[in-house]
Amino acid sequence: MKLSIVIPVYNERTLVPQLLARVEAASLPDGVSRELVLVDDCSTDGTRDWLADFAATRPDVILRLQERNQGKGAALRTGFGAATGDVVLVQDADLEYDPREIPRLLEPLLDGRADVVFGTRFLGHTHRVLYYWHSVGNWLLTMLSNMLSNVNLTDMECCYKAFRREILSQIQLREDRFGFEPEVTAKVARLGCRIYEVPVSYSGRTYAEGKKINWKDGFSALRCILRYNLLA
């Protein structure tokens, strides 16, 4: 089985070398090979050149360069289109999530229980203490998403999501920014996919440290929850 790890990257020159080293050091189950699909979203801080050098001598790395900055969702569409694996997993480039936990996310897929696996930061694992109102907003968005899609996720907005390739091939994604999370959640629920959650740790960043999501994305997530559960 081949695992495609899709990593959207935007202006993470100081962190992306560490992130890729950790991804490559993650021990995969026997019989699972790995490819890295890196999508640079038109970075301006040297990330783009570093990724080009990194990918130049690596046959297991696919690099795609966006012509203009479009957002995480657009980068993931590009990455999903380039991925060749049987399972496709999303990994952010900012080190908020630990690649050593990737094998745990794969377990329900490898043993045939799941079609889709979500990570969750709220089922007992270590996490950095940060913004209270972010956690309240995440809870409200997850609750509304659950009510409309009739699933019982605890963390709809978690970065870590893994899919059997056949599932992604049945979904047409539209959102360019962080609306990817509620959109893909609504669409896999509508397909009747077997969805599992796996606890993951979380080492969140502050805005001073480079966190990119903001309050506008919260309102966008609300729009996406309503649109993709009720209208599309």
Image (tube, rainbow, N blue to C red):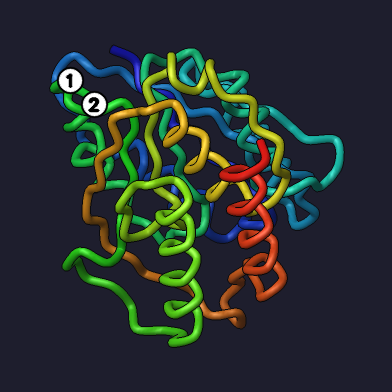
Q: Please give the name of the residue rendered at 26% of the width and 56% of the height, measured from the top-left corner.
A: 200
Task: Report x, y in % for residue 25.
Answer: 28, 40
Task: Report x, y in % for residue 219.
Answer: 68, 68
Q: Which mark is residue 109?
A: 2
Crowdedness of circle 2 by 10 Å Cα count: few (<14), some, many (20+)?
A: many
Q: Which residue is mark 1?
A: 112
Q: Quadrant of residue 86?
A: top left
Q: In the rendered structure, which amino acid carries the disc numbered 1?
A: Gly
Task: Report x, y in % for residue 106.
Answer: 24, 32
Q: Which mark is residue 34?
A: none
Task: Report x, y in % for residue 193.
Answer: 35, 28
Q: Please give the name of the residue rendered at 45% of the width and 52% of the height, measured from the top-left corner.
A: 159
Q: Please give the name of the residue rendered at 70% of the width and 43% of the height, measured from the top-left corner.
A: 175
9 shown above or below 222: above
Q: Which quarter shows the C terminus?
A: top right
128 shown above or below 147: below
Crowdedness of circle 1 by 10 Å Cα count: few (<14), some, many (20+)?
A: few
Q: Element under label 1?
A: loop
Q: Please give the name of the residue rendered at 41% of the width and 34% of the height, measured from the top-left corner.
A: 89
Q: Nearer the viewer, residue 152 or 173?
A: 152
Q: Nearer the viewer, residue 125 or 51?
A: 125
Question: Do the numbered discs 2 and 1 sit on residues whose CB atoms are within 8 Å?
Answer: yes
71 shown above or below 63: below
Q: In the rendered structure, which amino acid carries the disc numbered 2?
A: Leu
